[in-house]
Image (tube, rainbow, N blue to C red):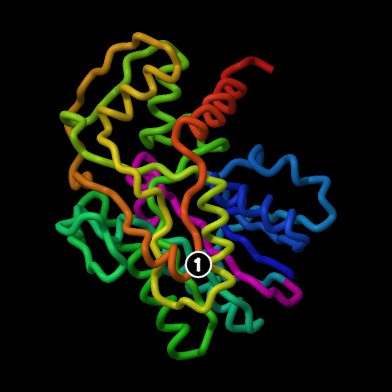
């Protein structure tokens, strides 16, 4: 199988490349490196079946040869970065998605796009099920990311209905693990970075907002299963175990044996109050559910971050 992966040097994208190569595939990776890092894929440089090109998928794509699977993961998924690059974020979900779809249409390939739980906005339904249409602010600060993903789902379905492209849509909920960037700004690397530096843990608002955290190996397994399924409508992929951000901060303190205080800052605009996936569809259609518990996943992530903070 020959795979084209956008966002290949990103957090989840690099782990997906690992998996596709381990399964015997050939992988061509694309990434413009705005948020991705070549360090995430440097261990793949010696692999005969892996090639990488620094490339912006919002430009026309002319990769030679025929692909069996096209995976569109290119996106600025962290609030820190999509607020800094709102236009690029919108383009990766719109023009970037269509360009990748064109390759899939050209080659008769399967196509998977990674969407997001942010399609549900600040949900009025809990937990979130795929048939819920969401409560999204289309003009708020976060809209560049939310609407880019909502559009990417719409254009993906349009290509399936109009051109018969074999498409899949993954709505990813909070995912964590090795290769997240220390300056990512999202809660897991933020807390771990602060803890490793013996700094106070920053909680936004009163910490009562909830999240659920899925380890990256579980997420990649879900993506692979979805890409090989016949399900065309969106599928939630995430861990349904919900906890508050304050509880999560306290768990980090216990896990790492630190006494760093927790400090509170104002809650960002349009920050979702509750986030928990209903994964009944993934269980039924894909036979998938997360296997890695939070403590085990965090230990692996902490070990990675420690290696990043240790001078070479």
* Residue for point 44% across, 63% down: 283
Point out residue 296 in the picture as x, y percentages from the top left corner: 51, 32
Residue 102: name its quadrant. bottom right
Specify whether residue 86 is painted magenta: yes
Task: Classify 131 as above or below 52.
Answer: below
185 left or right, relative to 61: left
> What is the total number of numbered labels drawn onto the structure image?
1
The residue segment tinted magenta is 64-89
32 left or right, relative to 120: right
Q: Nearer the viewer, residue 9 or 244?
A: 244
Point out residue 60 in the picture as x, y percentages from the top left corner: 58, 71
212 left or right, relative to 63: left
Point out residue 234 in the picture as x, y percentages from the top left corner: 39, 70
Element under disc 1: helix
* Residue for point 37% across, 48% down: 82
- Give the position of the C terminus as an image quadrant: top right
Dot 1 alpha-carbon crowd within 10 angstroms: few under 14, some 14 to 19, many 20 or more: many
Residue that label 1 marks: 286
Task: Classify 97 as above or below 261.
Answer: below
Q: Is residue 88 visible?
A: no
Q: Nearer the viewer, residue 168 or 297?
A: 297
87 left or right, relative to 270: right
Q: Is residue 93 visible?
A: yes
Task: Classify 244 as above or below 201.
Answer: below
- Give the position of the N terminus as an image quadrant: bottom right
* Residue for point 68% across, 75% down: 68
* Residue for point 23% across, 56% down: 121
Point out residue 292 in the picture as x, y percentages from the top left corner: 51, 41
Specify whether residue 51 is painted magenta: no
Residue 213: name its quadrant. top left
């Amino acid at each position: 199988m020959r795979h084209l992966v956008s966002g290949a040097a990103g957090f989840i994208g690099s782990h997906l490349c690992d998996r596709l190569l381990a399964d015997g595939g050939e992988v061509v990776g694309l990434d413009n490196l705005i948020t991705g890092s070549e360090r995430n894929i440097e261990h793949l440089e010696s692999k005969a079946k892996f090639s990488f090109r620094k490339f912006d998928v919002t430009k026309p794509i002319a990769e030679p040869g025929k692909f069996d699977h096209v995976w569109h993961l290119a996106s600025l998924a962290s609030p820190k970065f999509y607020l800094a690059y709102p236009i690029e974020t919108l383009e990766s979900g719109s023009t970037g998605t269509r360009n990748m779809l064109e390759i899939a249409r050209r080659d008769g390939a399967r196509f998977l796009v990674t969407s997001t739980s942010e399609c549900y906005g600040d949900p009025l339904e809990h937990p979130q099920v795929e048939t819920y249409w969401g409560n999204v602010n289309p003009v708020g600060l976060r809209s560049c990311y939310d609407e880019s993903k909502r559009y990417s789902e719409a254009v993906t379905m349009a290509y399936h209905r109009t051109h018969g492209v074999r498409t899949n849509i993954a709505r990813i909920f909070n995912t964590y693990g090795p290769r997240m960037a220390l300056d990512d700004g999202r809660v897991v690397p933020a807390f771990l970075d602060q803890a490793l530096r013996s700094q106070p843990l920053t909680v936004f608002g009163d910490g009562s907002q909830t999240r659920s955290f899925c380890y990256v190996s579980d997420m990649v397994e879900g993506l692979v299963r979805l890409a090989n399924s016949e399900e065309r409508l969106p599928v939630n992929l995430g861990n349904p175990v919900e906890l508050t951000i304050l509880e999560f901060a306290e768990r980090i303190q216990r896990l790492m044996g630190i006494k760093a205080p927790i400090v509170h800052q104002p809650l960002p605009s349009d920050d979702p109050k509750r986030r928990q996936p209903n994964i009944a569809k993934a269980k039924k259609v894909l036979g998938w559910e997360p296997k890695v518990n939070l403590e085990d996943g965090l230990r692996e992530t902490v070990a990675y971050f420690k290696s990043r903070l240790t001078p070479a």
